[in-house]
Each structure stands twice: as structure tokens, then as C-alpha cells.
């Protein structure tokens, strides 16, 4: 089963989410403070668990603010909400499914009520999840989808919408333009979805040309810098560079500066080191990937599931064999960076680490 459908927009859900994202959802009087609602972007009313329960977590890695933000969001929201997080573990890298299997086995033996999984692979987990469920541990998909019907629900983001948002940002500034592309690693479905959607939206913009790019390479700054340097030498008249993730985007921005070009970069995922580049315009637009918000939502929806309460904004379709919630994309630009709470939604505290969460 392909992941593409997971990121398809459902109009009623997305409209509701966007209204919430803009802060227009009003909570019933006496149910929660404005600050409490704001930490969840108004997507759901914050609750405290009436019946305490336990959660265990295993994520791909904690090497970037996205996954670290999910872990921090889970841990902090659980403290606020009368939920116990018994363990946060990491697989170490994409593809390390055996490590995650061992971590899930540990959660099962310890009797966790919920196992939150940022899966190291899309496939291969179904038997393990089924065993967890048979022992009373429900599985929640964190950040990215996983191919199994034995998942209670998932919380992620619309990857295609990220690509669409970045193309729109370029079109709004300079429709008749040329964008060089660094699509991302081969075999990464999230990168493919973003780039395909970027190209599709760019085709709607009169005069916007996107140069083809080859999937491959790593996700580090050095690779983004080397690829952008080569592309700029071959295409001296380019206006923009597209990258699917901020590490590549920052490398591309450094290459632009070295060659003294007037070329802007678009990318995705907010990290602290990129903020100055957004402010001075080297990064034209960067979409938020609110890992902290996703972590908080996983806890809040687990409370609702555990207590049999309403699960608002959940999408139920044939895209995945379980219900899922998508956080809407938001483009951070030099114009709105001063008003966006990246410490609240994207970037965990500097002093937080996995040890402090145990």
C-alpha cells in the first residue's frame, strides 16, 4: 500500500483545522484557558485523564527537532494531563526495525496501555502490532504513517501540502522564474510526495519553471551545499532553489552566499539555526513541521480513546487502514516569523534530552 493517500486533503477536516490554526475556534466557557487551547492550536479541547494510563514511545531517532519535538511534546503533555510515560526509546535510524521490535516487546512486557511508534519503515510491523493489541497495548502512529490495520490512530502532517505551500510561496513573489531542485533521498516517500506536489502546483503558476532533479544522496547540510553549488554553476540565471528539508535548505543557502547569487531557497522544518536565514530573506519560505504539537495531540487523543470520548477532526478513509489526524502546513517567511511561536510548536527546549524525559 502506498502512503500517497494518507496526505490527501479532506475538505471539511482541513477547513476546520485551518480555522483552528488561525485561532478562531471558541472553546466552551469554563473548559480550558486560552493558553491551554493555544498549545494545541485550537485543534482539540485539552483534557486531563480521568482514568490514568501509561504510554511508551519508540521513535526513529532524536537527531532532529522534528522527532525530538514529538518526544518532548508527548512527555510534556503527559505531565500536564495525568498520563504516565514509562519509556522513550529510539531505533537509531530509518530501517532499524529489529531495534524497534525489541523496544515494542519491552513495552508489551511492561504492560503499557499505549505504544507510540514513529516507525523506522512503512512495512513489516503488522504482526508485532497485532501481538501488542492482543496483550492489551494499543498502537499509535507518530509523525509518519505505517502500513498496518492494527493501529488505533495516527497523528502526522500532509506531505503533499508542504510541497504545494512552497510552490505557492515562490509564485506569489515571482511567477515568471526558474527554480532549481534538490528533491531529497531516493526511496523516501515523504520527499517524493513533497516534490511531486511542488511540481504540480508550480505548473499552475504562469511562467514558473522547475528544473528536474535526481533523487539521491544524504540529508545533511554538506550535501545540500555541494548539490546547490553544482546547480548554480550550471544554471546561472536561476531565481530559487527547492529543497524538501531544512538541512538541505541551509546548505543550499550557504552555496548561494558563497557564489554571491541573488537566489532564494524554500524548504521545510523549523530549526533554531535557520531562523536568522529566514529573517534576512535567504530562506524565502520554510514550512512548519510542528513535532511538539503532534506529540501533544497524540496524548490528548489517547485520553479520548481511553475514555471513549469524541475524536474530532479524525480522517477515516481508504488512504490508511486506521483513523488519522493531519496538522495543517504553515509557511514561515520574513514577514510572519516574528509572530510565530516556534518554541511552542516546533523547537524543544535547548536543555531537553531523552534522559530528562525518563
Image (tube, helix red, strand yellow):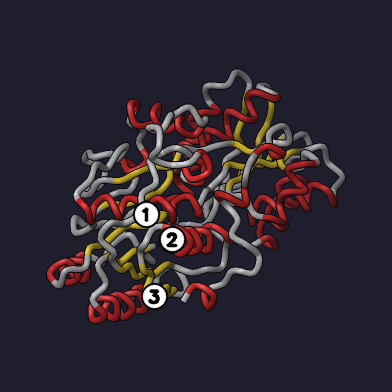
Q: Residue furthest right?
A: 260
Q: Quadrant of residue 331?
A: top right
Point out residue 65 in the picture as x, y percentages from the top left corner: 57, 60
- Pointer 1: what residue? 298
Instruction: Say whether marks 1 and 2 touch (CB < 8 Å).
Output: yes
Residue at 80% across / 41% down in the picture? 280
Looking at the rendered structure, the secondary structure element under dot 3 is strand
Which sits earlier in the primary sequence, circle 3 or circle 1?
3
Q: Is residue 109 above or below residue 236?
A: below
CA distance for labels 3 and 2: 11 Å
Q: Nearer the viewer, residue 42 or 225?
A: 42
Looking at the rendered structure, the secondary structure element under dot 1 is helix
- Pointer 3: what residue? 87
Taking the image as shown, residue 138 lies to the left or right of residue 59, namely: left
- Mark 2 burial class by Cα count in 10 Å: few <14, some 14-19, many 20+: many
Q: Is residue 212 above or below residue 48?
A: above
Residue at 30% across / 46% down in the picture? 324
- Mark 3 burial class by Cα count in 10 Å: few <14, some 14-19, many 20+: many
Residue at 85% across / 52% down in the picture? 258
- Pointer 2: what residue? 74
Amino acid at each position: 500500500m502506498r502512503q500517497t493517500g494518507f496526505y490527501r486533503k479532506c475538505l471539511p477536516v482541513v477547513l476546520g483545522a485551518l480555522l483552528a490554526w488561525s485561532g478562531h475556534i471558541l472553546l466552551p466557557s469554563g473548559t480550558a484557558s486560552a493558553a491551554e487551547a493555544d498549545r494545541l492550536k485550537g485543534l482539540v479541547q485539552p483534557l486531563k485523564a480521568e482514568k490514568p494510563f501509561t504510554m511508551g514511545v519508540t521513535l526513529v531517532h532524536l537527531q532532529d527537532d522534528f522527532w525530538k519535538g514529538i518526544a518532548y511534546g508527548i512527555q510534556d503533555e503527559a505531565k500536564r494531563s495525568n498520563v504516565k510515560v514509562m519509556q522513550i526509546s529510539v531505533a537509531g535510524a530509518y530501517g532499524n526495525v529489529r531495534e524497534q521490535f525489541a523496544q515494542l516487546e519491552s513495552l508489551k512486557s511492561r504492560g503499557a496501555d499505549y505504544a507510540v511508534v514513529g516507525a523506522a519503515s512503512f512495512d513489516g510491523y503488522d504482526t508485532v502490532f497485532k501481538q501488542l493489541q492482543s496483550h492489551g497495548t494499543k498502537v499509535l502512529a507518530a509523525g509518519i504513517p505505517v502500513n498496518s490495520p492494527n493501529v488505533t490512530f495516527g497523528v502526522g502532517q500532509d506531505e503533499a501540502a508542504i510541497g504545494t505551500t512552497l510552490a505557492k510561496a515562490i509564485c506569489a513573489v515571482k511567477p515568471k522564474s526558474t527554480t532549481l531542485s534538490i528533491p531529497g533521498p531516493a526511496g523516501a516517500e515523504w520527499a517524493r510526495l513533497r516534490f511531486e506536489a511542488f511540481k504540480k502546483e508550480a505548473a499552475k503558476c504562469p511562467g514558473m519553471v522547475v528544473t528536474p532533479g535526481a533523487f539521491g544522496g544524504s540529508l545533511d547540510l554538506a550535501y545540500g551545499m555541494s548539490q546547490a553549488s553544482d546547480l548554480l554553476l550550471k544554471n546561472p540565471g536561476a531565481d530559487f532553489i527547492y529543497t524538501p528539508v531544512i538541512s538541505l535548505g541551509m546548505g543550499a543557502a550557504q552555496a548561494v552566499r558563497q557564489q554571491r547569487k541573488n537566489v532564494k531557497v524554500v524548504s521545510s522544518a523549523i530549526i533554531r539555526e535557520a531562523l536568522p536565514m529566514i529573517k534576512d530573506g535567504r530562506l524565502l519560505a520554510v514550512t512548519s513541521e510542528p513535532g511538539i504539537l503532534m506529540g501533544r495531540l497524540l496524548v490528548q487523543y489517547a485520553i479520548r480513546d481511553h475514555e471513549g470520548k469524541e475524536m474530532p477532526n479524525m480522517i477515516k478513509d481508504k488512504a490508511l487502514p486506521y483513523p488519522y489526524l493531519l496538522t495543517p502546513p504553515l509557511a514561515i517567511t520574513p514577514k510572519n516569523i516574528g509572530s510565530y511561536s516556534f518554541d511552542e510548536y516546533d523547537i524543544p527546549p535547548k536543555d531537553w534530552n531523552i534522559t530528562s524525559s525518563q
